[in-house]
Amino acid sequence: MDNCWICSNIADSEEHKFKASDLKRFHGKKMNALYISKKIIELNSYKDKSLKFPKVICTNCNNNLTRPHDDAYDKFVIFCFENHEQILKTQVIDFEEIYGENWELEKVNLYRYYAKHAGCKIVTSNIKADLKNLSEFIKGNIQVTDFLVKFERKAGVQAIMHAFNLADKYNHLYNSETTYWNIHIAPKFGGWLSNNYMTTNWVFGTNINTNSKNIFKNKYETILLTDNHFFEIKEQEDDTEFSRIKFIDQYIIGFENSHNKTTELKVEYFENLILANNTAHNNS
């Protein structure tokens, strides 16, 4: 058995790839949902092994240390879902509106939730990386120089949610593949989590966040708005059925990847997030 990447104790807990509270809130304990990975998996329980990481953290870190981070995440995604039109109009997330007078601490806790998720993604990618800065942040450090997040709203995901909900109840949760680059020099990793209307991009790499102390002092965060002009319907051969797999690959995954359809484009996108983050916070 491996050690917990956060505290180095024995890793005996399986962290959910998607928050268990999301799965239960949207699908119930007895689920009727699809999980899209390298294949389509039909789910009937939020405890399904395919929805969990291998044992890379310990029970104490998962259930006790990071519980406030989980709570901050729950408040954040519920607010974003219930106020998605307001966020679309203003293009701003107001953390005081979400969390009240304790918004600064809760914002830190929200980022720590995504740090835990990113760390589990990195560990299971089997690419060696030093996660000490990330683990110290989760354990209480107020700065995190190796990690950043950026919020985004994707028009394509919004469109498919509206279309699906005309006929049935549809909730959209997506956990991207991990992109990694610069492996032999100083590895960097990027990915994202989508919860209905809101996508949270994350990037990890040594000293990529040059002024992290300013992030948690900012009550407001702007969001990226990604159009769906990239999308083109692929012509199907006359004798080829437009299967469920092709539909999911073209539409759902296509909308999630948006303009970044290749690894090279994803790397460019994540590098631009690093540049924009440092520029914005260094000037704030």
Image (cartoon, helix red, strand yellow):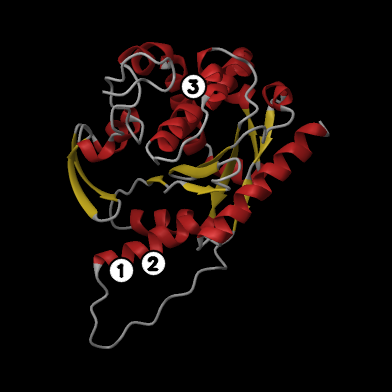
Separation of residues labelled 1 and 2 (CA atoms): 6 Å
Q: Which residue is mark 1?
A: 246
Q: Which residue is mark 2?
A: 250
Q: Mark 1, residues whose alpha carbon is within 10 Å: few (<14), some, or many (≥20)?
A: few
Compare residues 93 and 246 and report the one nearer the observer.
Answer: 246
Describe residue 194's horizontal placement relative to residue 96 as left or right: left
Q: Determine the residue positioned at 25% across, 56% down.
A: 39
Q: Position of residue 119 (x, y in %)?
A: 46, 31
Compare residues 281 and 90 and report the one nearer the observer.
Answer: 281
Kind of residue at badge 1: Lys
Q: Earlier in the sequence, mark 2 or mark 3?
A: 3
Q: Determine the residue positioned at 30% across, 86% down.
A: 237
Reply above or below: 180 against 28: below
Kind of residue at badge 2: Gln
Q: Position of residue 204 (x, y in %)?
A: 56, 36
Q: Position of residue 107 (x, y in %)?
A: 59, 22
In which quadrant will I find the C terminus?
top right
Describe residue 36's horizontal placement relative to residue 90 as left or right: left
Q: Which residue is mark 3?
A: 72
Separation of residues labelled 2 and 3 (CA atoms): 33 Å
Secondary structure, mark 1, is helix
Instruction: Check contact, mark 1 vs mark 3: CB within 8 A.
Output: no
Instruction: Check contact, mark 1 vs mark 2: CB within 8 A.
Output: yes
Kind of residue at badge 3: Ala
Reply above or below: 13 against 30: above
Q: Residue furthest right?
A: 283
Instruction: Check contact, mark 2 vs mark 3: CB within 8 A.
Output: no
